[in-house]
Image (spheres, rainbow, N blue to C red):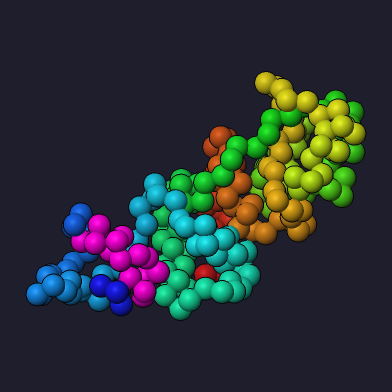
């Protein structure tokens, strides 16, 4: 059991739960569980990944290396990538695997929207990222470092609104520009709009396997 848990990057407690639920093929010999080594643990589409695996998945989707991951974790990551690319609804799978807080819904004067979009402290994402190829005139979706948020709200008179035209994802630090592709996919996957979510599958198909 310990070898299997290490190989799959999960806890022994989780392995025992999978055996109990009939999701792993195993038999008890004496006091040891012998697990079919062909068994592969796959996450339920509704269960979030661990924080480390979520970061790794975003990096892998962005074509970036994933430092600090063990060999078993890298194997699991390849399995997740394959499952995501083969899913009929990858937006649903991705949004379940990597939860996120809803963006702030703010309003800015239409005359200031273009200036806000050019501000060096924001990074376009979601429907505002050119890679999404989604037309959303008069609206802006961005990522902002938490340290810059108050200044931006004050300078542009950004206010919470039930008719927002600015959607702000708040990060611990400023995002690179453009945002990593994996992060863009997560933002699109969480969008309430069908056209935005459908772009997840399109972008995955355009990526090199």
Tell me where residue 192 appears, x and y as whole percent. Answer: 56, 34
Please name whichever residue, 77 or 149, is drawn nearer the observer in this view of the structure: 149
Is residue 81 shown above or below 88? below
Most frequent secondary structure within the magenta stretch? helix
Residue at far front of view = 31
Tell me where residue 171 appears, x and y as whole percent. Answer: 69, 48
Quadrant the N terminus occupies: bottom left
Report if residue 16 lies within the magenta region. yes
Tell me where residue 144 appears, x and y as whole percent. Answer: 76, 46
Please name whichever residue, 155 or 201, is drawn nearer the observer in this view of the structure: 155
Count of marks, rendered view: 0
Is residue 88 something that shows in the picture?
no
Report if residue 10 lies within the magenta region. yes
Is residue 35 something that shows in the picture?
yes
Q: Residue at x 76, y 53 (%)?
A: 174
Residue at far top of view = 162
Is residue 86 shown above or below 146? below
Tell me where residue 117 appears, x and y as whole percent. Answer: 83, 42
Q: Residue at x 36, y 75 (%)?
A: 7
Residue 20 quadrant: bottom left
Q: Residue at x 36, y 70 (%)?
A: 8
Is residue 78 shown above or below 104? below
Residue 100 quadrant: top right
Q: Which residues are magenta?
A: 5-19
Please name whichever residue, 110 or 1, is drawn nearer the observer in this view of the structure: 1
- 209 left or right, relative to 173: left
Residue at far left of view = 30
Q: Residue at x 35, y 61 (%)?
A: 42
- 6 left or right, relative to 126: left
């Amino acid at each position: 059991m310990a070898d299997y848990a290490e190989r799959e990057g999960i806890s022994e407690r989780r392995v025992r739960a999978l055996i109990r639920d009939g999701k792993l093929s195993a038999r008890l010999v004496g006091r040891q569980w012998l697990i079919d080594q062909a068994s592969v643990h796959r996450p339920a589409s509704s269960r979030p990944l661990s924080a480390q695996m979520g970061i790794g998945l975003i990096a892998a989707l962005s074509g970036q290396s994933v430092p600090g991951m063990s060999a078993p974790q890298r194997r699991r990551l390849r399995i997740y990538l394959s499952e995501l690319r083969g899913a009929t609804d990858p937006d649903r799978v991705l949004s379940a695997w990597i939860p996120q807080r809803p963006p702030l819904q703010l309003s800015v004067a239409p005359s200031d929207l273009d200036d806000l979009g050019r501000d060096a402290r924001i990074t376009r994402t979601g429907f505002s990222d050119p890679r999404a190829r989604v037309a959303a005139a008069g609206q802006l979706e961005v990522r902002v470092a938490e340290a810059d948020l108050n200044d931006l709200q004050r300078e542009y008179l950004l206010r919470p609104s039930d008719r927002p035209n600015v959607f702000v994802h708040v990060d611990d630090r400023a995002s690179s520009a453009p945002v990593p592709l994996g992060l863009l996919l997560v933002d699109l996957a969480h969008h309430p709009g069908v056209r935005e979510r459908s772009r997840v599958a399109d972008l995955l198909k355009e990526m090199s396997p």
